[in-house]
Each structure stands twice: as structure tokens, then as C-alpha cells.
């Protein structure tokens, strides 16, 4: 919550399954496009919030399966668990608030009287969330009956139906929308209300997000019937909410452009990155651009031209060094030379590179230290290095570009070397 000194330029609050993450795209292209856009243009001054129905257990599983960025704030279990930062520190105030008028034993007791309800897995039963599967054609009727019987027992609950199959029972004050309202209230009290907030979703448990005042909203093109119906009945005339024509993360990018919330061209959609004219040279953009080139070079998606490597060498400081995660130190220019032999070695293969949490800090009048996580996925193998890059604009104006002075990498815990892979950068 305290990562930014001032107000966020943009806060994105996005659902994960079928919104940020497209389970029908094995290449994860729209997610990777979003990642490159976020890291190059927003990470440094904006906030990324993931709001998912998943429990911490299933959320962590998804992070292992998909090339997801690390959010600043994670809201899990349908707005019942709020955590901050990489260490996922829980918001205790939220837990206390949710304890009011809630007794999960009574919920278990009452729901056991409905044979139509099938309990979800143990991981999805949380302190403030009891979850079932229920058939679509029975959902409305069961929800009504349940709400009556729980009310009779003195509970004030919220029952939500999502994805045409999931039924969640939560305390009345919980839910994705209430969790966002709680966050916004906290930001306001700290004088740090984001300049813009964009909520993104596809299913029933996301509906509440769209009812929070003053936020922009995007229902991705593949949104579920239940969300579209909710919108038609409750928010039809709200011009701050759109139904994107693009699926999942591509729909989020579309909404950023539609509402003019900031840059909406992902570097992944720019083929000739050397041509990008930049008014203010940006260290984060530089890092994203370099690793995108590296991916394209190995996938043979850029022309096989010495010209590219010559360009790269020209932005490396002549005495610049690279400390490989193995500890071996080399000249940066020699590392660029070694790229010659690996052109197209990943052509037609599953090979993707992405960077996460790219955070530049100006450390001198003409130098920047950029720290980030560099991920590389080759087939089933995924590796990550914590990477530090020292960039300098010495002897040139910043608009002309930055020189790479030093690169240092160390294996990230648990994402370290694998004997049969080679790590270049
Ligand atoms: C996620 C959760 C599940 C919940 C559903 C809808 O799939 O794992 O427990 O019912 O979201 O909120
Ligand atoms: Mg979803």
C-alpha cells in the first residue's frame, strides 16, 4: 500500500480467470501483451490489484501455470482476503470487519439441508467463504431458499453465483466490490486516492466491482451471461462501463485506450522497437524493449541482421560487464556477440520472456538502477533471475538513449538453474 509516495496514476483492479488470464489461449499472448504494457508504462507510478475468487492455494497454483505479473495488492476468496505486497501481508482490519454477523458453522449446518449443493474442494472453504457447485437451472431457486433460511438463523450473508456453476456464501460486508470500496476508503484517508481506477471482470462475482462509484469498468468480450444480465438491469446507462470487443487481457488494454487512461500500445505490438520515438527516455521501457528483442531474436521473429546486434553493442558501455547468475563475469559486448549463434534456436518452440516489477530508481544525475525479475519459459521449464541493470545517459542527452553500464543477475529462490538449459541474459 505504501509503495507509491503519491497518488497512483492508474489503479487496475482485475479478476484473473477468463479476465486477466485467458484459459483458451495456450500461448498467453494477450496476458504477455498486457504485461509488457504495464511494466514499460505503468509499474512505476500505478497500482495493480488482482481480485480473484480463488483461495490463496489456487491463486498460487495459477501463478505457477501462467506468466502473471506480481500485483501490489491481492484480493482473494471473493473479496474476503486482502493482502499487500510480495510477502502478501494480510489486512487484519478487513478480517475483523468481516467477523460481524458471521458464523460459518451455521452456514455449514443450513447448507447441508440442500442436496442440490455440492461442496467445493477443501482449499476453497475459507474463514469467510463457503463454496459449492450448483446446476445453472436450480441456482436462482436455491439462492432464494438459502437466503431465507440463513436470515432466520440471524446471519446477514451475501450469496453469489458465478460462471454458471459456483455458489459462494460470504458475510454481507464481503465481496469484490466491498473489498475495493474498503481499499479506496483507505487510500482516501491517506490522501492517496488513485487518479483513475479501472475494474475488469467477466463473471457474477465481478458485478459488484462495477457498482463502485467513480470507477471505469470493462466487461471483457467473453463475459458470462450472468454479468451481462446484471449490467443490463443495473448499469446500462453508465458510460464509464464498456463491454469490450476483445477477449480477456486484450479487452483490458482496449479499455485503457477507450477511456484514455494512459498509453495503450503494448511494446509487444510494436514490431520495430528501434524506431520508437521517445520524448522522455524511460529506463523501464528500455528494459522491456531489450528482453522483447531477445525473445524475438531467439524465436526468429526479427530479421536475421547483424545490424541489430551492432545497435545493441553500441548501447553497451565499452567496459560494461555482466555478472551471470553462475557468478561468471563477462564483458557486455561479448554477451551480445554470443547472441549471434542462437538466432532462431527457439523458432517454432514454446519460448517466452517477460519481466516483472520493473522498478527504476535514479541514482545519480545521469544514471538509473533498474531492478526487476526476468522470467524465461522454454517448453515446461521456467526460470527467473533477480536482475539489476545500471543505465547511464552520460555524454548523450537522455532523449538520445541510455547506455547499459552493468548487469547483475542472481537466481530467484526456487526458480533457479536447470541442468539442461542455458541462460544467456
Ligand atoms: C473461484 C474459486 C471458487 C469460487 C469461484 C467463484 O473459482 O476457486 O471457490 O466459487 O471462484 O467465485
Ligand atoms: Mg473470472
Image (cartoon, grey):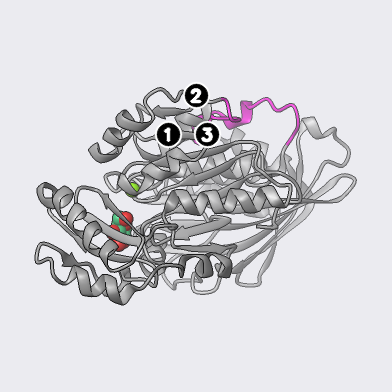
Q: Which residue is mark 2?
A: 258
Question: At numbered mark 1, what does the secondary structure look like: helix, strand or loop?
Answer: strand
Quarter residue 153 falls in: bottom left
Task: Please tell me whether residue 277 belongs to the stretch shown in magenta.
Answer: yes
Residue beneath the point at 23% across and 37% down: 225
Categorize mark 1 by other alpha carbons within 10 Å: few (<14), some (14-19), many (20+): many
Marked residue nearer the N-terminal end (1 or 2): 1
Task: Please tell me whether residue 288 belongs to the stretch shown in magenta.
Answer: no
Question: At numbered mark 2, what does the secondary structure look like: helix, strand or loop?
Answer: helix
Image side of residue 307 versus residue 302, left or right:
right
Label number found at residue 266 = 3
The magenta-colored residue range is 260-281
Marked residue nearer the N-terminal end (2 or 3): 2
Quarter residue 59 falls in: bottom left
Categorize mark 3 by other alpha carbons within 10 Å: few (<14), some (14-19), many (20+): some
Q: Quadrant of the C terminus?
A: bottom right
Marked residue nearer the N-terminal end (1 or 3): 1
Quarter residue 169 falls in: bottom left
Q: Nearer the viewer, mark 1 or mark 2?
A: 1
Q: Nearer the viewer, mark 1 or mark 3?
A: 1
Taking 218 as reference, is 24 above or below it?
below
Expressed as whole percent of the image width and height from the top left, the position of residue 245 reads 35, 26
**Badge 1 vs badge 2, beta-carbon distance below 8 Å:** yes
Alpha-carbon distance for marks 1 and 3? 18 Å
Expressed as whole percent of the image width and height from the top left, the position of residue 203 reads 31, 44
Q: Quadrant of the N terminus?
A: bottom right
Q: Which residue is mark 1?
A: 218
Amino acid at each position: 500500500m505504501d509503495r507509491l509516495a503519491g497518488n497512483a496514476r492508474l489503479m487496475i483492479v482485475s479478476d484473473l480467470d477468463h479476465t486477466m488470464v485467458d484459459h483458451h489461449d495456450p500461448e498467453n499472448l494477450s496476458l504477455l501483451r498486457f504485461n509488457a504494457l504495464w511494466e514499460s508504462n505503468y509499474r512505476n507510478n500505478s497500482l495493480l490489484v488482482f481480485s480473484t475468487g480463488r483461495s490463496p492455494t489456487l491463486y498460487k497454483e495459477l501463478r505457477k501455470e501462467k506468466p502473471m505479473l506480481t500485483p501490489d495488492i491481492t484480493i482473494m476468496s471473493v473479496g474476503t482476503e486482502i493482502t499487500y505486497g510480495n510477502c502478501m501481508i494480510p489486512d487484519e482490519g478487513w478480517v475483523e470487519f468481516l467477523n460481524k454477523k458471521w458464523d460459518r458453522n451455521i452456514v455449514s449446518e443450513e447448507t447441508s439441508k440442500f442436496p442440490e449443493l455440492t461442496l467445493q474442494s477443501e482449499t476453497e472453504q475459507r474463514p469467510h467463504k463457503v463454496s459449492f457447485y450448483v446446476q445453472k437451472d436450480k441456482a436462482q431457486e436455491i439462492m432464494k431458499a438459502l437466503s431465507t433460511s440463513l436470515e432466520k438463523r440471524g446471519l446477514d450473508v451475501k450469496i453469489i453465483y458465478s460462471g454458471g456453476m459456483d455458489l459462494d456464501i460470504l458475510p454481507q460486508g464481503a465481496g469484490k466490490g466491498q473489498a475495493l470500496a474498503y481499499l479506496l476508503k483507505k487510500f482516501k484517508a491517506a490522501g492517496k486516492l488513485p487518479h483513475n481506477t479501472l475494474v475488469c471482470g467477466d463473471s457474477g462475482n465481478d458485478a459488484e466491482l462495477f457498482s463502485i462509484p467513480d470507477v471505469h469498468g470493462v466487461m471483457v468480450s467473453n463475459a458470462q451471461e450472468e454479468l451481462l444480465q446484471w449490467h443490463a438491469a443495473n448499469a446500462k446507462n453508465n458510460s464509464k462501463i464498456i463491454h469490450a470487443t476483445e477477449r480477456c487481457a486484450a479487452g483490458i488494454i482496449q479499455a485503457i485506450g477507450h477511456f484514455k487512461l494512459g498509453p495503450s500500445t503494448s511494446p509487444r505490438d510494436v514490431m520495430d522497437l528501434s524506431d520508437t520515438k521517445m520524448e522522455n527516455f524511460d529506463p523501464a521501457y528500455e528494459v522491456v524493449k531489450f528482453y522483447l528483442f531477445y525473445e524475438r531474436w531467439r524465436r526468429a521473429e526479427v530479421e536475421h541482421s547483424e545490424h541489430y546486434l551492432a545497435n545493441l553493442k553500441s548501447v553497451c558501455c565499452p567496459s560494461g560487464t555482466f555478472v551471470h547468475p553462475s557468478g561468471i563475469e563477462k564483458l557486455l559486448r561479448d554477451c551480445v556477440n554470443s547472441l549471434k549463434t542462437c538466432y532462431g534456436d527457439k523458432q517454432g518452440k514454446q519460448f517466452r520472456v517477460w519481466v516483472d516489477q520493473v522498478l527504476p530508481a535514479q541514482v545519480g544525475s545521469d544514471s538509473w538502477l533498474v531492478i526487476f525479475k526476468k522470467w524465461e519459459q522454454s517448453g515446461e521449464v521456467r526460470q527467473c533471475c533477480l536482475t539489476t541493470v545500471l543505465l547511464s545517459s552520460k555524454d548523450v542527452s537522455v532523449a538520445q538513449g541510455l547506455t547499459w553500464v552493468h548487469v547483475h543477475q542472481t537466481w530467484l529462490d526456487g526458480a533457479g538453474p536447470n541442468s539442461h538449459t542455458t541462460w544467456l541474459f
